[in-house]
Image (cartoon, grey):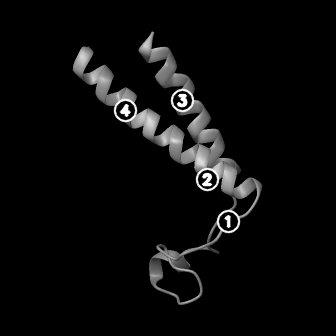
Amino acid sequence: MLDIILLVVSALLILLSLLQSGKSDGLGAFTGSNDLGLFANVKERGPEKLLSHVTLILGIIFFALVIVIRIVG
């Protein structure tokens, strides 16, 4: 049962990650350009903020499910 929940959470996490808009153009985040870095503080509004929060919550649920499955199974 937990495996099925993990599968559904994984699929939703992938889908929500793909729906989010990119925070940088190209490899600028990794090469150190000054415009928008990897750890830049970017303010999100509206649906982008909701997607970001739901993705964070699903990521935490995914992490917890993996630990629970590992301990139980």
| Residue 63 image-quadrant placement | top left
Q: Amino acid at mark 1?
A: Glu
Badge 2 marks a residue whose secondary structure is: helix
Q: Residue at x 56, y 24 (%)?
A: 8
User: Callout 3: 10 Å neighbours few (<14), some, many (20+)?
Assistant: some
Label ID, residue 52: 2
Q: Closer to the N terminus: mark 4 or mark 1?
A: 1
Residue wearing tag 4: 64
In this rendering, the answer to whether 36 lies above or below 34 is above
Q: Amino acid at mark 3?
A: Val
Separation of marks 4 and 2 at Cα, in angstroms: 19 Å
Q: Position of residue 57 (x, y in %)?
A: 52, 42
Residue wearing tag 1: 44
Separation of marks 2 and 1 at Cα, in angstroms: 8 Å
Q: Would residue 29 be seen by someone viewing this image from the given angle?
A: yes
Q: Amino acid at mark 4?
A: Ala
User: Callout 2: 10 Å neighbours few (<14), some, many (20+)?
Assistant: some
Q: Residue at x 46, y 76 (%)?
A: 30
User: Callout 4: 10 Å neighbours few (<14), some, many (20+)?
Assistant: few
Separation of marks 3 and 2 at Cα, in angstroms: 15 Å
Q: Is 70 placed left or right of 45 in the picture?
A: left
Q: Amino acid at mark 2?
A: Ser
Label ID, residue 9: 3
Q: Would residue 20 be seen by someone viewing this image from the given angle?
A: no
Q: Are marks 2 and 1 in contact (CB under 8 Å)?
A: yes
Task: Spot the residue most to the top.
Answer: 1
Badge 4 marks a residue whose secondary structure is: helix
Q: Position of residue 37 (x, y in %)?
A: 51, 79
